[in-house]
Image: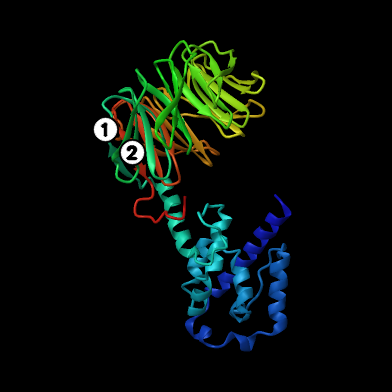
Amino acid sequence: MSSSTLKLVSKTKLWRSLTKRVFTFSPRSQSRSSKSHTSDSSSNDILANLRQGNDSGKELQLSGIDLISSLPYEICLHILTYADFLLLARLMLVSKFWHQIASDSEIWKQLYLNQQWYVRIPPNNPRLDWKYLYQQRSTIDKRWKSGSIDKRLIAGHSDSVYCLKFDGNKIVTGSRDRSVKFWDIDTGKCTVSLTGHCRSVLCLDYNDEIMVTGSSDTTIIVWDMKTLTSKFRIRGHSAGVLDVCFDKEHIVSCSKDGTIRVWSIHNGELIKVLLGHRGPVNAIQLQDNILVSASGDSVVKMWDINTGECIREFVGHTRGLACVQFDGKRVVSGSNDYTIKVWDAQSGRCLRTLTGHRDLVRTLHLSGKHLVSGSYDQTVKVWDIQTGKCILDLRNGHSSWVFDVQFSLTKIISVGQDQKILVWDVAHGVDVSLLE
């Protein structure tokens, strides 16, 4: 633990000790001015202890006097930046003075930022109501833990939905009906339907400029996201294209033919072929110049796409793999052995195995401390990636295999063989305008 963290912990412990005394005051004793009982030297002693940490753990003997409220307002504010939510809530019930100071926006700003939560506009914007933001954001956190989630169905595909990706205002899906559809995320209405593949659309990826789709027709189409027209088609795989991803220079695809191919994002020319898997390559993920791949041969491989070299293997599953995620530090794989394994990306060591699904783990999405999985057992599960604990088990949504899941702070979206697009809304009734 760092020295700064130790100081914060010790200051927080002392502050809890001080406030315990405050809560024992009777209204009569509070009505008398505590200033008459407090000298400047006493105030200085408290501040000195707060700064130094009071490592001895001895509780200051305050003799029933609210010393803190006699300090300058700015110092009280500084002290309260070490408080947590529960302490602030209790302080607001003590007196008008404590209610006023514990409601100060600067304190709630620090409490919010200490959680490392995102806010859309710069934190120094004076218009932000930090207490309000904290209330909205903490409500979402509680719902992730409690499972208080609204479910909404979007329908429109005429066959299985294999893949999806979404952002703040739209969902994009690919289907066995050979179409790629765009949906308004709020209304659920289909806004665009693209056709170009002559068989199932199995995978897709997009950013603001382009979209890349892969199909069981063995081709890849690169689309212009502004005009929603095809820029060019890539041919080269001898079987269905099972996954695609891209960066500024490369498009990477994997296939049922057992190969991984790296293409130029500018013109679709083949740059290199990565060989090594002994079965269909079902999923890939790209971070900088590092690619991870998952195969029906039950092995995860890590590649340097600049050299084409396989730099690491992750071995431990007993059956074929369907999905993989990679965040730079961890590799997560889902298998037909019904398990999810979390691996250390540097050493290749298996950190933990997550169990709970009762069929093939078909899809994964890793972001921050959460992992979401979808399975042929028709369920979607949410896991704490650090502990391996399943924190949510979403049932009664899909009536058949789950093919893909994606999630954000406010929602989980899943698609499956039953043609459904399900939006699991964690933030119903919450103002999220500044939170994501």
Residue 217 visible, this angle = yes
- Above or below, 379 against 277 in this view is below
Q: Residue 46: x percent and y percent? A: 69, 74
| Residue that badge 1 annotates | 156
Question: Percent from the top left, x then y, of residue 403?
Answer: 38, 27
Label 1, label 2: how many angstroms apart (C-alpha)? Answer: 10 Å
- In the rendered structure, the answer to whether residue 35 lies left or right of residue 7 reads left
Helix, strand or loop at disc 1?
loop
Amino acid found under the numbered disc labelled 1: Gly
Q: Nearer the viewer, residue 202 or 365?
A: 202
Type of amino acid under label 2? Trp
In the rendered image, the vertical position of residue 293 relative to residue 27, given as above or below: above
Q: Residue at 38% of width from left, 55% of height from top?
A: 430
Q: Which residue is mark 2?
A: 183
> Image check: 38 left or right of 210?
right
**Quarter residue 343 falls in:** top right
Label 2 sits on a secondary structure element that is: strand
Q: Residue at x 52, y 73 (%)?
A: 23
Disc 1 and disc 2 in contact, CB within 8 angstroms: yes
Q: In the image, is 126 to the left or to the right of 61? A: left
Residue 335, can we see it? no
